[in-house]
Amino acid sequence: MLETDHLFLVPAQVPMLDAIVRGDWPELSRLMGGVDFADDWYHFPEVFAWMHDYLSENPDDGMWWSYLIVHKQDVRLIGTCGYKGAPSIDGEVEIGYEIADAYQNRGLATEAAHALTQFAFSQSGVKKVIAQTLAEENASVHVLRKLGFQFVCTKVDMEEGEIWEWGKIEVRGEK
């Protein structure tokens, strides 16, 4: 588990993913110590079934996938974040994050993205963290700039269309 000032980032384990896929919110709450749920705490339900199947077959890869974001004070699940797989052979790992609408504009996405970035750089062999956003000025772009990510390039994604890629290279001694 990763912890920030306001958040717990809880690794999504197979039983949790199973509860999410089944929509069994009482079971998910039980597995997470009694959390409540923010409205619209996730936006990509199809990811959970895929992740459930993947982690069932590859349990040692859990730290490089999904985390459930719990707001400490409210004891409420407010979003998801994580990595899109283990680092590449070149030491690059991609992060992603989403926060429920009611919890946006409070710096919580920045906290989660910062925790993911710092955790990645603390792992052996990770040299660069990347993220992708829609190709427009938006809240995610603001988060990444705030964390020192630099614009890398524009790409075309089969599902999203044009996207921007951002990157941050490890700087020794940075906190």
Image (cartoon, grey):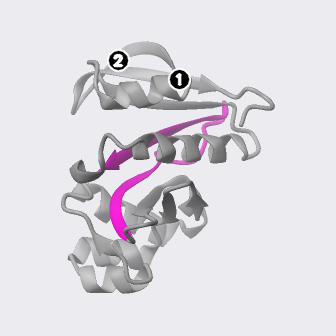
Q: Residue furthest right?
A: 173
Q: Amino acid at mark 1?
A: Phe
Relative depth, front residue between 151 and 59: 151
Side of 43 relative to 91 (left or right) = left
Residue 149: mark in rendering: 1
**Looking at the image, residue 123 lies above or below residue 155:** below
**Looking at the image, residue 27 lies above or below residue 47:** below
Which corner quadrant of the image does residue 134 belong to? Answer: top left
For the point 49% across and 56% down, the residue is 6
Please name the predominant secondary structure of the magenta segment in the image.
Answer: strand
Relative depth, front residue between 129 and 69: 69
**Looking at the image, residue 74 lies above or below residue 41:** below
Magenta segment includes 35: no
Which element carries disc 1, helix, strand or loop?
loop
For residue 68, say whether it is visible.
yes
- Image coords of residue 145 (percent x, y): 47, 22
Side of 155 relative to 86 (left or right) = left
Residue 122: mark in rendering: none
Which element carries disc 2, helix, strand or loop?
strand
Q: Amino acid at mark 2?
A: Lys
Side of 134 relative to 4 (left or right) = left
Tell me how many marks there are: 2
Which contiguous range is marked in magenta?
76-99
- Residue that numbered label 2 is attached to: 155
For the point 53% across and 65% down, the residue is 58
